[in-house]
Image (cartoon, rainbow, N blue to C red):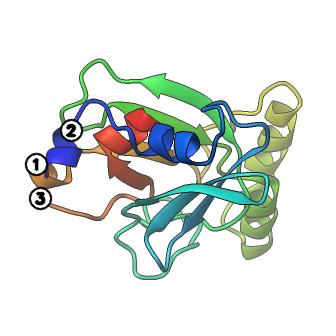
Amino acid sequence: FLQEIAIFGNKFTNACEDLGKAPILESPRVLVDVSDATLTIYDGEEMIVRYDISTGSCRVPGIIKADSHSTPLGDYKIVRKAKHESYLFQGSRFLQINYPSVEDIESAWQQGLIHAGEYERYFKNSETSDIPPDDLAISRQMGIRGNYFALSGSRSTNGEVAMSNGDINDI
């Protein structure tokens, strides 16, 4: 509970110090393991630190329909970082990923979940921005966010990856 309400975490910094690394990594990589409910930060192939997380309330991850409460599966990159000033229930930080990715859009198109206009708009948008449009039938802002699990009463999310505010602030 204390880590959930903490403003500052120190797990990442301590792990970097233990490994003799600067807290600015040369080749950062984040691996989210939905089945293990962990988020691990690597520098190249070297594991730096692992955190406990929560994911979507849908029992089947990777469903790409809007409002499925499913955590997307695939390779994504962080395209935007935000700090929330009023973070009691939305978490202190948000790291937006580029969901839906090209693979998600292609799959949605093949399954008939999006129409031709949405398909074309996605690719036109991708010419000028890494942030996908959030008004497609399968999209909404997705990412990694802080959370007060103890106050929200739930350890599941609407599909996003959630970690304690202390942990998200730490990274």
* Cβ–Cβ under 8 Å for marks 1 and 2: yes
Residue, x 51% and y 47% (percent of image)?
15
The amino acid type found where label 1 is placed reads Leu
27 is higher (above) or lower (below) than 83: below
**Residue assigned mark 3:** 153
Residue 137 bears which disc, if any? none
**Residue assigned mark 2:** 89
Report x, y in % for residue 71.
50, 65
**Residue 159: quarter of image:** bottom left
Tag 1 secondary structure? helix
Q: Nearer the viewer, residue 157 or 92?
A: 92
Residue 151 bears which disc, if any? 1
The amino acid type found where label 3 is placed reads Gly
Q: Earlier in the sequence, mark 2 or mark 3?
A: 2
* Cβ–Cβ under 8 Å for marks 3 and 1: yes
Estimate the spatial distance between the alpha carbons at disc 1 and disc 2, rounded to whole Å: 8 Å
